[in-house]
Image (spheres, helix red, strand yellow):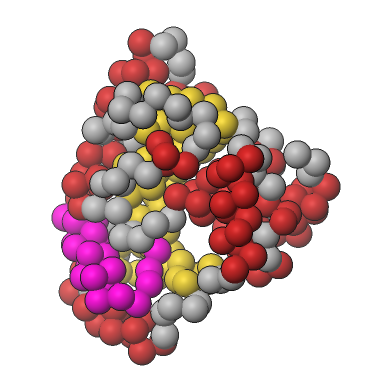
Amino acid sequence: MQVVGLVGYMDKYDFAINLARTINIMDKSVLVVDATLDQKLKYVVPALDNIGRSYVTQYNNIDFAVGFNSMHDVENYMIEQGININLYDHILIDIDSPKGYELFRTRGINKTYLFLDTSVLSIAKNKELVKAMRVYNQEEENLELTKVWFKAYLSRASENYFDTQIKEYNVKWVEPEYEIPNDDRDRIENIDSQLSGIIDIKKHSKMYISTIADITAEILEDSTSKLVLNKIKRRRD
């Protein structure tokens, strides 16, 4: 089982859903854990119709865990339900705060993607997140992160400024870095997915599909972007 941290102070629940769906298209089982402050997934995932409870539900063949206060709570719930959490191929954890990182990192995180935009608030909050990750990973010489940034929002000047702000934490950026487009087509498709309950990756923009295929291939390690793209195109939802 591989644990992937989707870390960063910004809304990325749509991306988490689409990434999970793409990994699932590659015949891998996925659990998405919402460790964010606002827990917005409980409003977005159609199957979550009992808002206020903490539980795991399935949507488009992907399991989603929302409303939990820690990874231990998720694990205890699954034990009670007779579910073996170790049978998942991948766990994606959406984290947007130092507290969330502290409470949901207990299984360890194999790969960490840091999501950025250019707002002053986002930069400040993401600096706090990197500081927290450094605290909880003191045994590592470098804090290895993969940068995911929104092209429409983040300038190179902003990116360089952020790098300067976190220089003291010994961050090692893992190549390549990724870009998520701010495209109207992608926003419309995300809304359609929320309303219809069907996650159809191939309806997104070409750049979005290419980026999510690249990240999926990197996570899976034994696949290529071309193979992922072909699976997406052939998929009939």
| Above or below for 235 versus 15 | above
Decide if residue 80 is in sight here.
Answer: yes
Task: Answer with left or right where residue 211 lies relative to residue 6.
Answer: right
Residue 126: say if magenta: yes
In the rendered view, tell whether residue 149 sits above or below residue 134.
Answer: below
Residue 108, percent from left and from top? 33, 41
From the viewer's side, name the closer residue of 53 and 66.
53
| Residue 208 visible, this angle | no
In the displayed orientation, state which residue is furthest to the bottom. Answer: 157
* Stretch in magenta: 115-135
Q: How many callouts does the rendering have?
A: 0
Residue at the image position 45 percent from the left and 71 percent from the top: 149
The percent coordinates of residue 105 (x first, y second) are 29, 41
Quadrant assignment for the C terminus = top right
Q: Is residue 118 magenta?
A: yes
- Residue 133 figure quarter: bottom left
Instruction: Determine which quarter of the picture holds residue 26.
Output: top right
Position of residue 121 measured from the top left corner of the image (x, y, whole percent): 23, 70
For the point 39% across and 57% down, the residue is 11
Q: Magenta-highlighted stretch: main secondary structure?
A: helix
Q: Position of residue 51 (x, y in %)?
A: 36, 29
Residue situated furthest right in the rendering: 234
Q: Residue at x 63, y 40 (%)?
A: 196
